[in-house]
Amino acid sequence: MGTFKNLKVYGIDYGTSKCGIAFLKQDVNIPLPKATVPSEKLLEYLISLDLSHDDLIVFGLPISMSGRYSKQSFLSIDEAIRVKERIGCKIYFVDERLTTSTLYSEFKGQVSYKKVKETKDQNSSVLILSNFIQSPGNAIALAEKEIYNLKKNFSNYKDVLIWDIPISNEVKNFSIFAKDPWVFWFYYKEGFRSTTLISDLKDYYDLIITTKENEDKIQVNINYSELMCL
């Protein structure tokens, strides 16, 4: 991902009531706490920062300890999409698991539990941004995907798996694997359940629908009769 020199870089710990915000101090390349704002004012606050299309915002992505996305994941992604549509800057997600427990561990014996809790949102955003700066390759870029409408009769297939690709066909009886945050968001808002874990999937599928980029991953992990790569 390269250097962040001359870029504005912010980290966000998004919550349903308030958000912690951190920023990258360029001269020392260290994330520092910036502000805590009400969630409904987040977009307004970010607009006031006058970000360019090359600047970066890093959202913490809530993931359960088992590795699954959740309603809170959807809310964070939904807000990130709203920000990107309005501001147009680059947006990334980093796994925010353990940020709170990490905070309490780091400050144990130095700062009171109450004090850590009071500043948790800002401190969590610092950790989120720090994780991104240290390992940008582990982050997932927010990118809208092409939505496919397939002209195919699926009635002859018993078990169908959609692998990390958005399709607008009726998918009520399909299994859905959605590791990409945007793909997860797409299905969640339509009321369809998906998973991020291969262990949640069946051992065999009559048909798997995916992209050519994912073909190698599927051949390693899943048994199938037919593979449709779009």
Image: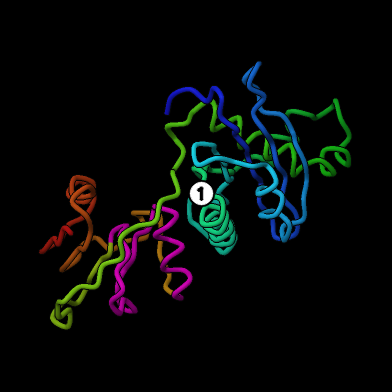
Camera sees residue 191 = yes
x and y percentages locating residue 127 in the rendered image: 65, 34
Colouring of the image: rainbow
Of the 4 image quadrants, the one containing the N terminus is top left
Please check the rendered image and state whether residue 178 is part of the magenta-colored stretch, yes or no. yes
Q: Which residue is mark 1?
A: 88
Please state the horizontal and vertical placement of residue 132, each as a whole percent of the image: 54, 33
Q: Amino acid at mark 1?
A: Gly
Q: Which image quadrant is residue 116 in?
A: top right
Query: Which residue: 55% across, 54% down?
Result: 80
Q: Is residue 138 above or below residue 213?
A: above
Q: Is residue 127 above or below residue 203?
A: above
Which quarter of the rendering shows the C terminus? bottom left
- The answer to whether any part of residue 92 appears in the image is no
Q: Which residues are magenta?
A: 163-191
How many C-alpha atoms fall within 10 Å of the one at disc 1: few (<14), some, or many (≥20)?
A: some
**Would you say 42 lies left or right of 116 here?**
left
In this figure, what is the number of numbered marks?
1
- Residue furthest to the bottom in view is 155
Instruction: Give me the residue at 41% from left, 51% from top.
Output: 143
Location of residue 15 by image quarter: bottom right
Q: Position of residue 193 (x, y in %)?
A: 43, 70
Q: Residue at x 71, y 49 (%)?
A: 45
Q: Position of residue 53 (x, y in %)?
A: 50, 42
**Which of 6 and 199 lies nearest the eye of the viewer?**
6
Q: Residue furthest left?
A: 225
**124 left or right of 177 in image:** right
Element type at marker 1? loop
